[in-house]
Image (cartoon, rainbow, N blue to C red):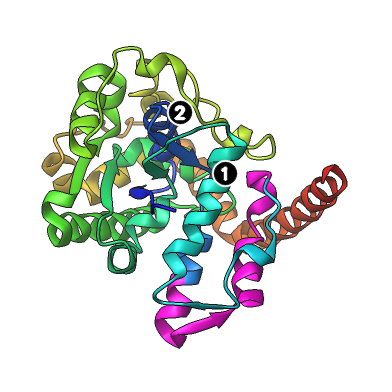
């Protein structure tokens, strides 16, 4: 069985990696899979130990399989998973998913897991033929999407540190892999999708078709669909500046001030918003909201973990009943 060539898309969470994966995955030679953080766990453990048992390998990967609608037979994998055969084992999972999606003769595995950009060195070590797409989005738009989330940084200061960490890892990936990594801007995909996708297809080595955007292939699992409402739809340019009316003006000013040089470096427009003259009440409301978010964030994250565990148990139960 030939190893599929991986195309690892990465960037800040909520930067559009799933949307881009869906767009590329519509090509007949590509299979786009759900997020696959299991591969990072497997490769990291193997990098430390050199080998793991079949049971340990299955324990790592089956955690996500209910979201893939796959039931794996342990007999299809070797008894011992080593540095030499781990990519073949992961490839079996991808090929089974391609069969489940009725896609034949695929050559490229499109993986849109955002932390790919944080794990690019170990991914490149085990997949020397891999190519990376570093997806960048205006940090204020990312903040607008991330700050309200229970799992994300909940204040402008926390957000800017978090964003800079991801961007630093992305720039490191660009520098380390050079011609094997391409930088793509989310805004370019929305404002001129044909041109943006042609550039990406040329980079991967596949033929671009103008109807690529009309038949996006990937559909998020029903339990995560609320996080990816724009996936499968035509690019919506109205979302380019949505943060200007949705993100609190004080948060906009703080983020724009802290990240001013980065915003200019990536070619985004600087915000010249000034604080209203009579803004004491506005500041107090914003301060109260931000402090509440920070204080409650540990409890919200704990509640989110509990909800995810319940959700996963429910998925596994339904999955086992169907199979």
Residue that appears at 51% across and 32% down: 103
Q: Relative to the observer, which residue lies in front, 231 or 316?
A: 316
SS class of the residue under badge 1? Answer: helix
On screen, residue 172 versus residue 72, left or right, reads: left
Q: Callout 2 environment at 10 Å: few (<14), some (14 to 19), or many (20+)? A: few
Membership of 73 in magenta stretch: no
Q: Residue furthest bottom?
A: 49
Membership of 55 in magenta stretch: yes
Q: Count all numbered tags in the image, as a single digit.
A: 2
Residue extent of the magenta highlight: 43-69
Of the numbered discs 2 and 1, the one sitting upstream in the chain is 1
Q: Main secondary structure of the magenta part?
A: helix
Q: Relative to the observer, which residue lies in front, 155 or 300?
A: 300
Q: Relative to the observer, which residue lies in front, 173 or 14?
A: 173
Q: Position of residue 105 (x, y in %)?
A: 43, 36
Q: Position of residue 143 (x, y in %)?
A: 40, 42
Residue that appears at 57% across and 44% down: 97
Q: Which mark is drawn over residue 97?
A: 1
Disc number lying in front (2 or 1): 1
Q: Quadrant of residue 247?
A: top left
SS class of the residue under badge 2? Answer: helix
Q: Position of residue 45 (x, y in %)?
A: 48, 78
Residue 58 vertical position relative to residue 301 in the rendered view, above or below: below
């Amino acid at each position: 069985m030939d190893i599929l060539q991986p195309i690892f898309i990465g960037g800040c969470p909520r930067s559009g990696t799933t949307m881009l994966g869906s767009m590329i995955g519509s090509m007949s030679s590509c299979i786009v899979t759900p997020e696959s953080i299991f591969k990072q766990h497997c490769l990291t453990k193997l990098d430390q130990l050199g080998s793991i048992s079949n049971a340990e390998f299955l324990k790592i990967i089956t955690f996500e399989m209910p979201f893939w609608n796959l039931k794996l037979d342990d007999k299809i994998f070797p008894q011992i998973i080593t540095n030499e055969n781990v990519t073949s084992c992961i490839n079996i999972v991808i090929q089974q998913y391609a069969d489940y999606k009725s896609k034949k003769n695929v050559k490229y595995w499109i993986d849109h897991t955002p932390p790919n950009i944080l794990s690019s060195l170990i991914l490149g070590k085990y997949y020397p033929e891999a190519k990376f797409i570093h997806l960048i989005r205006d940090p204020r738009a990312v903040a607008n999407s991330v700050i309200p989330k229970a799992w994300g940084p909940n204040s402008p200061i926390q957000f800017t540190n978090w964003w800079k960490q991801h961007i630093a890892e992305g720039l490191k990936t660009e520098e380390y892999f050079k011609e094997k990594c391409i930088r793509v801007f989310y805004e370019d995909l929305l404002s001129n999708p044909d041109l943006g996708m042609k550039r990406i297809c040329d980079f991967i080595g596949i033929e671009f078709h103008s109807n690529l955007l009309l038949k996006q292939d990937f559909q998020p699992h029903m339990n995560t669909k609320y996080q990816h409402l724009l996936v499968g739809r035509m690019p919506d340019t109205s979302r380019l500046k949505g943060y200007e009316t949705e993100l609190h003006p004080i948060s906009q000013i703080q983020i724009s001030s802290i990240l001013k040089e980065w915003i200019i470096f990536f070619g985004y427009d600087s915000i010249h918003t000034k604080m209203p003259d009579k803004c004491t009440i506005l500041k107090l409301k914003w301060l109260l909201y931000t402090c509440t978010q920070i204080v409650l964030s540990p409890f919200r994250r704990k509640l989110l973990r509990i909800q995810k565990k319940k959700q996963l148990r429910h998925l596994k139960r339904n999955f086992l009943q169907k199979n």
